[in-house]
Image (tube, grey):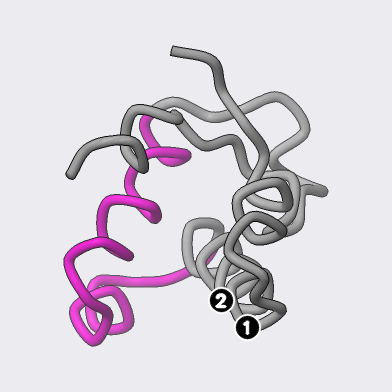
Amino acid sequence: MSARSRATVAAEQGSKWTLAHYDEVVGLARTAGPEQIARTGIMDWVMIARPRVETPPGFASMDGAGLPVDASVYDKP
């Protein structure tokens, strides 16, 4: 599957809140400890864990709009 940016997904969803949420997730992925992560939902856990395990290029300066998305995650019913 091709990777799309969070900005593309947000544009398709028509939600500025989505981009703000992804910005928060990127920040958590960079710096959050276990207590902060425990307060998020399961999907956020996955979005926080993925860049920690598989760091995308430019992650240190990335915002939520640039975080890559695996299209298969959104294409499943």
Residue that badge 2 annotates: 21
Q: Residue at x 22, y 76 (%)?
A: 41
Q: Which quadrant: the C terminus?
A: top left
Mark 1 sits on what residue? 17
Does 15 sit above or below residue 74? below
41 or 76, which lies in front?
Answer: 76
Most extreme residue toward the top is: 1
The answer to whether 53 is drawn above or below residue 26 in the figure is above
Does the magenta segment cover residue 59?
no
Which three-letter amino acid code belongs to the residue tagged 1?
Answer: Trp
- Magenta extent: 31-53
Q: Relative to 48, say whether 20 is above or below.
A: below
Locate residue 26: give its quadrant: bottom right
> In front: mark 2 or mark 1?
1
Q: Quadrant of the N terminus?
A: top left
Mark 1 surroundings: few (<14), some (14-19) or many (≥20) residues within 10 A: few
Spot occupied by residue 20 in the image (x, y as percentages of width and height) = 67, 78
Give whichever of 45, 21 is nearer the camera. 21
Q: Secondary structure at mark 1?
A: helix
Count of numbered marks: 2
The image quadrant that residue 70 belongs to is top left
What residue do we see at 49% from left, 69% from top?
28
